[in-house]
Amino acid sequence: MKHTLSVLVENTPGALSRITGLFSGRAFNIESLNVAATLDPSLSHITLVTRGDEFIIEQIIKQLRRLVDVFKVVDVSEGEFVEREMALIKVRAEEQSRAEILRICDIFRCKVVDVSPKSYTLEVTGPESKLKAVIELLRPIGIKEIIRTGNIAIMREKKTI
Amino acid sequence: MAKMTGKQMVVEALKREGVDVIFGFPGGAIIDFYDTLEKDGTIKHVLVRHEQGAAHAADGYARASGKVGVCVATSGPGATNTVTGIATASLDSIPIVVFTGQVPTALIGNDAFQEVDIVGITRPCTKHNYLVKDVKDLPQVLKEAFYIAKSGRPGPVLVDLPKDVQNGKAEFDYPEEIKLRSYNPVIEPHGKQIERAYRLIEKAKRPVIYAGGGVIISNAAKELRALAKTMHIPVTMTLMGLGGFPGTHELSLGMLGMHGTYCANMAMANSDLIIAVGARFDDRVTGKIEAFAPLAKIIHLDIDPTSIQKNVKVDVPIVGDCKRVLKKLLLAAKDAGRSSEAWMDQHHAWLEQLDTWKNRHPLTYKEEPGVIKPQNVIEKLYEMTKGRAIITTEVGQNQMWTAQFYKFDEPRTLLTSGGLGTMGYGLPAAIGAQMAFPDKLVVDVAGDGSIQMNIQEMATAMEQRLPVKIVILNNQFLGMVRQWQELFYDRRYAATEFEMTPDFVKLAEAYGAKGFRATKPEEVDDVLSKGLEAEGLTIMEFAIAREEGVFPMVPAGKPTTEMLLV
Ligand SMILES: Cc1cc2nc3c(=O)[nH]c(=O)nc-3n(C[C@H](O)[C@H](O)[C@H](O)COP(=O)(O)OP(=O)(O)OC[C@H]3O[C@@H](n4cnc5c(N)ncnc54)[C@H](O)[C@@H]3O)c2cc1C
Ligand SMILES: Cc1ncc(C[n+]2csc(CCOP(=O)(O)OP(=O)(O)O)c2C)c(N)n1
Ligand SMILES: [Mg+2]
């Protein structure tokens, strides 16, 4: 099962490598990782997507909490949550495919963020499934490059981490 | 407030933390600290002969005394030499603080002379570590280092001190108290869990207490004894738990696991309730996990949530300091008002069954005329030192024979590397223990292989006039590995036989110590009494049966009921 963990850590130099080291050292997997500032400059926020059965996820959460730099860990995928990923996709845009690209763009509410005589760069935001769909549609047209962020997620309603 | 240099801050913090002795080895990146230490003159420094020795000595000091052990090394090779000692302390949850010198902050990352990223290297084997980049942060870091090392589940903490930080100046505002928002070990157990646990205990017909290193760490031996006695519940111990409950007590089943007693392993396999107290279900204990304690419900007391449900499913987890948890369980029993007789009635049949197992296959060995049996040496060592000695061990057969044949009645009397299994641990650990208890008898039970891994610390012991006693069980083999080869590799003794070993008696003499050797059974008593009674550092070497094995033995990955017996 896929789990999305929200981790608040002390904003110290070693914190991130302690977390990635924990995953590699204990053979847990990381599917995606996103690190960013929070409103409180002394804390960073990490969104981490991982996979495992309930015992492994329980261990991962406990092991994360054990790290001295880790302030809080929440498995946001346990409840209702919203998740978003973003991709920048540079796609080959020849005379005959331009209209097609723009149509896909329209359907998925992507943005064209850069245009050149031979390519469009699109910005796609959404849950992973949406990114996958867009990528599949663009693939036959000719994707030159994709850069993706990790997943970020937030709990619904009144809950905060 | 007057300003202070970083090096003065470290010395000052040591004093405030009540550190009276540190172990270390100098070099360019830590020379400034040493200069201050020398000028101050109030803290005893033990100069080791290898930084690994310093880390193990700090660890031995910590295990014997329950206080935080401290060691110091220079940057680069000095720092890397401590790594095995740090990992050893980490796997056995031992509180030590390691200070390392580092190149000046401006040079960090430049492959400067003797630069190594020790914080990076030790990240996975410390509880926490710090590279101090600004002397202003140092007071807080020092306080945190000691606090983190000793609180919760203890462990090693490393503080890396760049040269300019040692020499920089700032205000020394040492926090009296400390509170870290991201680090809050749970000490007090949850009342509900105590209730649930007590209800299970009340119903159990075949309960066993499985006691581990946590009992010793939390100084809970008294509470454990009270609980076992009140409820008439038998106790088995891990290697790390030995001494947490008296080995001579009638309720003691001895050690469990790979080289545990027949009775202890049978007890686990047939129990209907296992009460794990500060133990972590290590694979040496569980054997094949699917076959482990198939009939038992499990109550698990541990201060570290990650230990719970890591290897086996637990019915009642209780997070907290096991001393407090045991106290609360005792209170619950008292409140329930059940008499000692009632408990006895409930467990009578079970205790009888255990006695049958105990008598069926007690720990034993075969005597052979003219040959010294290592088990016999340990038995005699036990008889001669009973209750007086702190025993350290090396790793291998020597360690297992000690665990089996020396009966540890008191906590902190067996110091052994269980988790990492570090050959070379015993001698420096004995030095640390002897520094903590100058008047106690400290004996390192060693193998001929292990003792050579940190033999250089003989010089340290001599220099400090420490009367450490070393018992070498010499089989001229890396015996434990040889035993596996004998049993599972068709007796192909690949790289386990020593064609050359030093003359340990002469070696002792070379260091200015005394050496004694026994090659026949009738010499054992004499060598032991001479070696133990002689003043100062001694080596007692015993030429033991070369291919003696450690039994019982559960082959790795097998159910613990499938024991190879003598
Ligand atoms: C050659 C060799 C053979 C071995 N054979 C055996 C064998 O046959 N049998 C055996 O048992 N071991 C054996 N060992 C040792 C084994 O590898 C483990 O080190 C040992 O079993 C672990 O002991 P433990 O479970 O008590 O855990 P420890 O490593 O002592 O861990 C302590 C546990 O207590 C918890 N704790 C710490 N402080 C507290 C507190 N205040 N309150 C509550 N809980 C706390 C910790 O979180 C941890 O879970 C062998 C080792 C070697 C080198
Ligand atoms: C540093 C280190 N290297 C290798 C091992 C693997 N090992 C475990 S026991 C053992 C044999 C130890 O030999 P010795 O000290 O003579 O003890 P014996 O088993 O013969 O009593 C070895 C090599 C280890 N535990 N530690
Ligand atoms: Mg040997």
Image (cartoon, rainbow, N blue to C red):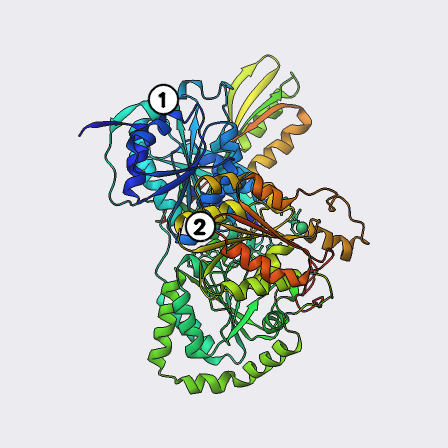
Which residue occupies the foreground of this view, B68 or B49? B49
Q: Which residue is mark 2?
A: B433
Q: Position of residue B337 (x, y in %)?
A: 35, 83
Q: Residue at x 36, y 35 (%)?
A: A38
Q: Are marks 1 and 2 on the same chain?
A: yes
Which residue occupies the foreground of this view, B378 or A104? B378
| B506 displayed left or right of B236 | right
Q: Position of residue B191 (x, y in %)?
A: 35, 67
Q: Position of residue B336 (x, y in %)?
A: 36, 81
Residue A103 shows which numbered tag?
none
Pointer 1 chain = B
Around disc 1, counting alpha carbons within 10 Å, would you say few (fewer than 14), some (14 to 19), or many (20 or more)? many
Choose top left, top right, bottom left or bottom right for residue B290: bottom right
Q: How many marks?
A: 2
- Quote the CA–CA distance across marks 1 and 2: 34 Å
Q: Residue at x 60, y 81 (%)?
A: B353
Q: Is residue B194 above or below residue A13?
A: below
| B162 displayed left or right of B345 | left
Give the secondary structure at mark 1. Answer: helix
Choose top left, top right, bottom left or bottom right for residue B403: bottom right
Foreground mark, 1 or 2, reads: 2
Pointer 2 chain = B
> Is residue B518 something one can see in this rendering?
yes
Which residue occupies the foreground of this view, B260 or B517? B517
Residue lying furthest left in this view? B1
Q: Position of residue B207 (x, y in %)?
A: 52, 75
* Residue behind label 2 places its C-beta within 8 angstroms of ligand 1: no
What kind of residue is marked 2? Ala
What kind of residue is marked 1? Asp
Q: Earlier in the sequence, mark 1 or mark 2?
A: 1
- Give the quarter of the figure containing the C terminus of chain B: bottom right
Q: Which residue is mark 1?
A: B164
